[in-house]
Image (cartoon, rainbow, N blue to C red):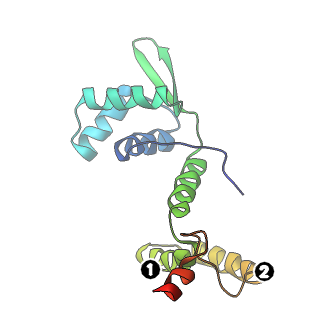
Amino acid sequence: MEATVKLEISDAEWEVMRIVWTLGESNSRQITEILADKMGWKSATVKTLLGRLVKKQALTTRKDGNAFIYTPLIAEQDAMDSATRALFGHLCQMKVGQTLADLIDDLTLSKANIADLQAQLAEKAKTAPETVACDCLPDGCDAMKQEA
């Protein structure tokens, strides 16, 4: 399933978004307090990041008395899927499988996550090709190896 979201945000902006996604909505004071504790950031830094995220249409804001309330406009899973697809789009397709295997080795997964992955892989194996071609060069990387 292809995510239609294209969210290009910095690592610092991801930190802000993770908080707002977790809380559902939050005011700038709450976000600032959490990020001051977690990252050591000053209020001005957090407010700058919030402003950027509103401008990028990742967050919406509304005034509630003296506070601004921030709410995500983009679902967390959609943003993560989009970022992951963008990253994997930069990799040689021939090496994606090994990259995923390395990533799985490094991650902490629940038994339920592992069972879901096993089921997905079993289903994917039914229609998987024997090999995946390189997409780095128009003729693939094997053509370059033969010329060398």
* Residue that extends furthest to the front in the rendered view of this protein: 147
Secondary structure at badge 2 equals: loop
Callout 1: helix, strand or loop?
helix
Q: Nearer the viewer, residue 145 or 92?
A: 145
Residue count near mark 1 (Cα–Cα under 10 Å), binned few <14, some 14–19, many ≥20: few
Does 4 sit left or right of 44 as displayed?
right
Marking on residue 117:
none
Q: Residue furthest top?
A: 65
The structure residue drawn at horizontal position 33% and vertical position 26%, both measured from the top left corner, is 47
The residue carrying mark 2 is 127
Furthest residue in direction right, as rendered: 127
Question: How many dots with numbers?
Answer: 2
What is the spatial separation of the Cα atoms under label 2 and label 1, in whole angstroms? Answer: 25 Å
The quarter of the rendered structure image containing the N terminus is bottom right
> For this rendering, which residue is in front, 137 or 105?
137
Q: Amino acid at mark 1?
A: Asp
Q: Give the x, y percent position of residue 84.
A: 53, 58
> Closest to the observer: 65 or 127?
127
Q: Picture coordinates of residue 68 (x, y %)?
A: 43, 20
* Crowding near the residue tagged with mark 2, few <14, some 14–19, many ≥20 C-alpha atoms within 10 Å: few
Q: Residue at x 78, y 80 (%)?
A: 127
The residue under label 1 is: 105
Kind of residue at badge 2: Thr
